[in-house]
Image (cartoon, coloured by chain):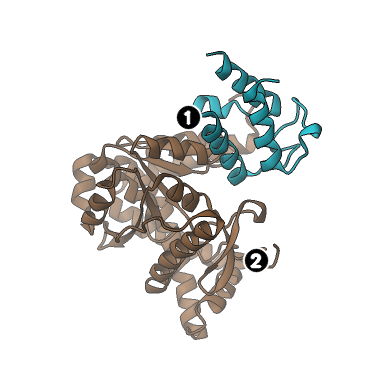
Chain colours: A cyan, B brown
Amino acid sequence: MSANRQIALEVISRISGTDPGELAPEQDLVADLGVDSPRALELLVELEDRLGVEISDEDAAALNTVGDILAYVERLGER
Amino acid sequence: MKHAPVRHRLEYVAYRAAKGAILAGTHEAARRHGRHLGRLGHRVMAGRRRLALDNLEKALPELDAAARRRVARECFEHYGSTFVESVSAARFTPEEVERRFTVHGWEHLEAAEAAGRGVFLMSGHLGCWELATYLLGLRLGGLQMVARPVDNPWVDRDLAAIRERFGNRIIAKRGAGHRMLNVLRRRGRVAIVIDQRVHWREGILVPFLGRPAWTSPVVAYLSLRTGAPVVPLFCFPEGEGGYRLELSPAVVPRGEGEAGVEALTGEYMAVVGEEIRRRPELWLWMHRRWHGWDRS
């Protein structure tokens, strides 16, 4: 597992209160994991802090599921 | 558009007809007619009227029953005129915006911007908050505003075009938090009204006009995160068709963590509450602001 992926799973787990082993790519942050607006902001900010990036508005708007986030951070790792 | 519900189409037709009638007259007439519309709303919207009176009794117990009835009636009149004026103001040229506004406390905004962290321009549903963005956008070269879309997509598109004049841009409420963060990172300005009730899952409880109220913590969180000061500003009707914009010294972020967010949010609501006490007839009393306060 890549370092970025590990970080993303940790962040999603902490923010959503869901055990990492229970996270699945198809889970929607809001509908399935109950991440509300303030917590979604916190999630993005923590990802930025830990990955050392600033997420653009366009990229942030596309991060709706666990899979979206994992794919995004993997692409970051390939740059 | 051909798949839009019939109701939306009918609403849009009515809206366009009303807008045409408003723009056919003067802006001063729009304010007068808007107040008549609000007075009608006060008569027919019994549930909202009772809600306004109940909120007034709990928030401003020093008012007697006659005063509460007067304030409730005047707030309906004010909101009628605010709605009509927002549409009427579509005609304003930059010169007319400057002519109609008197501004007090602009130096507070300049001082806040000098910090170089971006700035929040914070108001409440008090007075003529929407129209203030015209003057601000004109003088600042545009700002970003958080706004909830109107349910009717056609009316919303028209209102958005009015709102996005003078360089202003709307930040949709969905995903607004991170968008605001990116604006502040670029030293931009974000205009926001902070006195709306939020769902208990998305808010924190802070005192507001004497009672706990669910309030968004996002502004405080971002202010602490970025160092962006929060400049309170309020806009009031003045004369027959003019406006008075008042800016106050910025609330500078201090503290940290959840305690810092709660303290700052409480401070913002105290500032808004103080302005409401000064001009209670200009606030949105018919809103369920304190709904769900007993849930945590």
Chain containing mark 2: B
Residue position for label 2: B293
- Position of residue A15 measured from the top left corner of the image (x, y, whole percent): 66, 42
Say which of A79 and B59 sits in front. A79
Q: Residue placed farthest to the top in the image?
A: A78
Residue B294's image quarter?
A: bottom right
Label 1 vs label 2, nearer the camera: 1
Residue position for label 1: A54
Position above or below: B198 against B161: below
The kind of secondary structure element at disc 1 is loop
Chain containing mark 1: A
- Position of residue B168 measured from the top left corner of the image (x, y, whole percent): 35, 37
Residue B216 visible in the snapshot: yes
Q: Who's the residue at 41% across and 42% down the image?
A: B145
Position above or below: B137 against B229: above
| Amino acid tagged 1 | Glu
Could you give the CA–CA distance between mark 1 and mark 2, rounded to whole angstroms? 36 Å
